[in-house]
Image (cartoon, coloured by chain):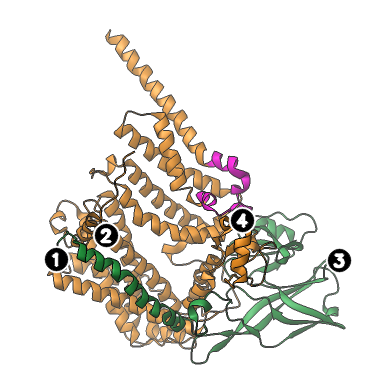
Chain colours: A orange, B green
Amino acid sequence: MNIKLPTLDQALKMVTDRLNNVDFFDETYVSKQKDNIWYKLGPLQWLTWIVTIVTGALLVMFYVPTAEQAYDTIIVIQEHIPFGWLIRGMHKYGADAFIIMCTLKMYRMFICADYKNNRELNLWICFFLLLLGFYSGLSGYLLIWNQRAFWATKVFATFPGYMDQFGINLAFLGETMVDKLLALGVPTSLPGTSVATGAGVLLDMKLLNKFINLNLGMTTQQILLGGSAIGQATITRFYSMHMALSTIGLIVTELYFYSNKKKRFNLPWWPDGFLMIAMIASVAMIFPAEMGARANPAVTPLPILSDWYFLALYQMYKYIEPVLATFVTVLIPATVLFTPFFDTSKEMNILKRPVILSLNIMGALNAIAFSVLIILNIANINVDPPYWIFGSTMIVAVGIYFSQLQYAKINRWKLFLTYTVFQFLYLSRIHTVPYFGFNLDPILGKTFLADGPWGRMWVFYGGFFLLLVAVYIFENIAAAKTSKVEAKAA
Amino acid sequence: MSNKLDRRDFIKAILAVPVIGGFASLFISPFIRYLKPSSGPLATAEIFKRPDKPSPVQEIRFAISDFPEPWSFKYFMFQETNREYTSVGEQIKTIPGAIVKTLKAEGKEDFVVFSRVCPHLGCVFNFVPVEDEVAAGYNYKPQPGQKVFACPCHLSVYDPMLDDSKGRGKVVSGPAPRSPFKFNFEIEGSEIVIRSLESGGIS
């Protein structure tokens, strides 16, 4: 093994190279637009964003962000103010279009390898714009103060609470050391409880015997909601962030365009720009934005659905333990952000990068399948998750198989090793947690994961073994055919 | 931009870390206190403490004679004052609750009084005494005579006769992490008095 750490100069160069290659809305890819229409997504992303900001600025003139008046002002905008319904519809569908553009652009960046040649930062920018869209969508629909808004916000605000259970495991310090720390007044969630009887929230789950709880979850909840419950402070905070984040983003992009003398919208306004705006406006006319019923904290509507881009995430919450679900919610963005750094080859063709391709397919299929399942209201925590994880790992296993086929003459042991490393680092990352000091077994008690390490092995490696069997069969059939052909020729 | 780094720049960079870090840490504490004003003056320590607790507005009373036989139940609304970071400073929230008379069991009260706010992700759950309904709608087949609470959102099912580490209402199916939050109640003569709610969760 020969691992070279970068020197400080090289590290600085890595950063400056990426900063010099920054690209917000595909303004450096204008020449590619003729060959590949997907490079028009960047300008359209900018356009949909601006449509949303402009219509939002118009809505602000009438909207009153208070729990008593919010719903009524929306009714007024919708029914009594001339063209109010159109402005509101365009705001909603403009935001939806922005999220669609961001998502498609993310996929394009992965498929066309736009992150290669020191351009990883561009993928990060696109991803943060997508997150901006998600956050604005979430904070935006609370402002309507209808049933869906209220209950979706409740779910959104409840799941960070599970971060309370991400303790810091101090067991490696030894019991006396931890007892000393507790005696010094290091905070835990159950002050005064000794190590022997167990201190902290994690012990509610019988998860750990020794840990320090930072109370991250409750603090995050209270900062998000502006108190301990959804109410006036929540509307005020969401309203402020809903506008502030887009405004800050707008200032940053405008400064960038100004200082680099770039054009904002790199498409002809006619017909491309006009068509996009016309599409948003016509959708707003044909399917007017919904109102829903006024928020009622005492009644949960059924079925409870969020906006379309969160459906898959909600389905995942039905399938895995909430602590893990929170953990995975944090890890999905991390995966997207850091995957480009592992794709280090010079290859640009997606078909010759099978692992990235299979990861993309897995992500897209998961999102689509979960969204369909939640709409059909199908979820059984005791039955479905193995199929889901089995299927996901199978797709990625196929990608790894083809990558091995491509870069080396296939070597089953190497394949096995790659798959193992991949499993431990990637899809089964939640199961690697125990190896770093957390024992999650007790809280997995209700799912299939309770089958113990061997049961898990079956779920995770079953796909791999099936794949090997398939490979064996196919290769032997192919070998038999070629030998027949050779025999005939002879 | 030059990519070379000479010794002087390197030393400057190294020295900048504690200086910038020191200034940053000066701002972290006031900033968190700004966002969460209920924190005390030593916010960096204070944010790690338990949250500001809600307080009950009014106690609720039920006559024991309202519950003639096991598994008769009533829903009620319990009001709590919650902290809110506005000029008003607090708001009154209504918590849906359920009181159920259970079977007699050794070492257990005759009643369970649960908050109907699901400890999973905050939906309002119901007492579902009809076994077929549970089997049809909630992915769980109760044993004969088993009565359960069930949440329509993510299909958690709670059995009031079983215990977990948080008391009665063990989760028998679904993703919920713990039994429901409980009301503290006392039996005074012929009345049940519900005084306060176990803290935690979002209301």
Residues flagged by tags 2 and 3 on a common chain: no
Q: Which mark is residue B104?
A: 3
For the point 32% across and 28% down, the residue is A409
For the point 38% across and 78% down, the residue is A241
Residue under pointer 4: A443
Of the numbered discs 2 and 1, the one sitting upstream in the chain is 2
- Closer to the camera in the image, A365 or A285: A365
Dot 3: within a 10 Å radius of its alpha carbon, few (fewer than 14), some, or many (20 or more) residues? few
Of the numbered discs 2 and 4, the one sitting upstream in the chain is 2
Q: Amino acid at mark 2?
A: Leu
Residue under pointer 1: A268
Which callout, 2 or 3, points to the residue nearer the camera?
2
Q: Is residue B76 above or below residue A476?
A: below
Letter of the chain that mark 1 sits on in the rendering: A
Dot 1: within a 10 Å radius of its alpha carbon, few (fewer than 14), some, or many (20 or more) residues? few
Please state the extent of the stretch shown in magenta in the rendering: A431-459
- Locate residue A41 relative to residue B128 in the image: left or right: left
- Locate residue A211 relative to residue A273 in the image: left or right: right
Q: CA separation, marks 2 and 4? A: 37 Å
Q: Which mark is residue A121?
A: 2
Dot 4: within a 10 Å radius of its alpha carbon, few (fewer than 14), some, or many (20 or more) residues? many
Which callout, 2 or 1, points to the residue nearer the camera?
2
Q: CA separation, marks 4 and 1? A: 56 Å
Letter of the chain that mark 3 sits on in the rendering: B
Q: Amino acid at mark 1?
A: Pro
